[in-house]
Image (cartoon, helix red, strand yellow):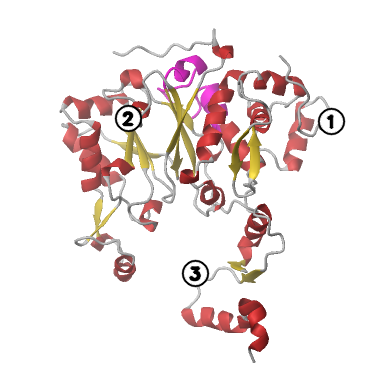
Amino acid sequence: MVVVTEVFVNLARTAARAHGLPDLRLVALPHPLESRTEADVRAIARARMRDLLGPLARDVG
Amino acid sequence: MARGTLLSELATVADDPDALLDYVEAQGWGDGLPVVPPTEARVQTMLDATPLPPSHVVGVVEPRRGEATVEKIAVNAVLAGCRPAYLPAVIAAVEAVCDPRFNLYAVNTTTCCATPALVLNGPARHALGVECGYSCLGHNGRANATIGRALRLVMRNVGGALPGVVSKSTFGQPGRVSLCFGEWEERSPWEPLHVRRGFAPTDSVMTVTCATGTQDIADIWAESGEELVLLLARSIDWIGNNKVLVPQDKGDMLLVLCPDFAHKIARDGLTVPDVQRMLLEHTRTPIERWPRGYWPKLEARGYVENGTVPLAASPEQFLLAVAGGEGGHHAVYFCTFGLTWTVSRRFDLAAATEGEVCELPSRA
């Protein structure tokens, strides 16, 4: 799994295909992260926790 | 001499420059400028300039990991407007950027405006008519304009560096069309760049460095070589420099001196290693130049030494070359992207270059 912000999805998909992993799981977060406050970034992380943990998230309540 | 059927897919386009340009633009192959039609005949003629077979893979071009075969390079060289004699130089440039040390994946995808800057040394400069003097960095000469352009087209068409889609360069830069010149070895007081990098003076060598731009440094007041080197050092250590973003021991950067600057420095007995040591010593920027909030971040990365942030870790990270017109008061600094190293490749001139000798001005 690779985590990118939205504007890098095309690049990540291209790189994944080039390396023989066309179905690589990508998680796209809002862009930009850099100029957000830490609280905002934490809120995004909490909201996307299930996606970020991937298959492991089955055991998360 | 034809080499058999080309492997590339053929397309039929009306015999009209506008139609061709529209087609190339629609395919996403070009850089916006007119192109030369890569007909089978032109590509075959281009291929005659190298003994390598068309199917030979020169390198894998990141990030799409396209195979840059000799044939694909030849097609892009035709599109770019290269003479067939330039092909070995273009192949050497492709080989250089595909060397892992150059880190093409990063250069082709970064938000930075970094681009390969091509420096030619040796007899190829004369044979191919590569401009080393006046306006060598732009707007002077077919070789300079098209060899760099051919590499850029390979990076785009084989490597997949489509702006906004894969290449995330925020602004790009004019050098992303072509940035290619020759060192004016005959007007340098020092050994040429390629000799200092381990090649023979008689070798033709393509050196590819990474440039975020061509930063002009002007001076008319230095009275000694030492003063001039200090002026140069203090002109290249600005705090928004992309090099500052990476560890100091990563990346090298090219400083191109006009012949007058080089002779003023050498007149005072300074050698290239002397200049490199001085550049290292005098590009240690006082941390006070950054806003206070930056200080702990620079400290946390281990970038701070005795209250300064060094630009580099060793003198060899500063590369020097001599080019540009006579009577100049300018140097040009190619600030590096950082996570990349300069790569050089020797190449052999094609037999086709005979009779195309270019006269460079003789040493004064």
* Quarter occupied by residue B133: top left
Respond whether the residues carrying marks 1 and 2 are from the same subunit.
Answer: yes
Residue at image mark 3: A34
- Looking at this view, name the residue that lies furthest to the bottom: A61
Rendered image: mark on residue B196: 2
Task: Please check the rendered image and state whether residue B61 is part of the magenta-colored stretch, yes or no.
Answer: no
Task: Please check the rendered image and state whether residue B125 is part of the magenta-colored stretch, yes or no.
Answer: yes
Crowding near the residue tagged with mark 3, few <14, some 14–19, many ≥20 C-alpha atoms within 10 Å: few
Q: Chain of mark 2?
A: B
Residue at image mark 1: B12
Question: Between tags 1 and 2, which lies in front?
Answer: 2
Mark yes or no: residue B31 visible.
no
* Quarter occupied by residue B204: top left
Question: Between tags 2 and 3, which lies in front?
Answer: 2
- Element under label 2? helix
Image quadrant occupied by the N terminus of chain B? top right
Q: Position of residue B307 (x, y in %)?
A: 21, 62
For marks 3 and 1, give the CA distance.
47 Å
Extent of the magenta region: B122-148
Residue under the point 52% across and 48% down: B107
Rendered image: mark on residue B281: none
Q: Chain of mark 1?
A: B
Above or below for B24 versus B172: above
Q: Earlier in the sequence, mark 1 or mark 2?
A: 1
Question: Between tags 3 and 1, which lies in front?
Answer: 1
Between residues B10 and B69, which one lies in front from this camera angle? B69
For marks 1 and 2, give the CA distance.
48 Å
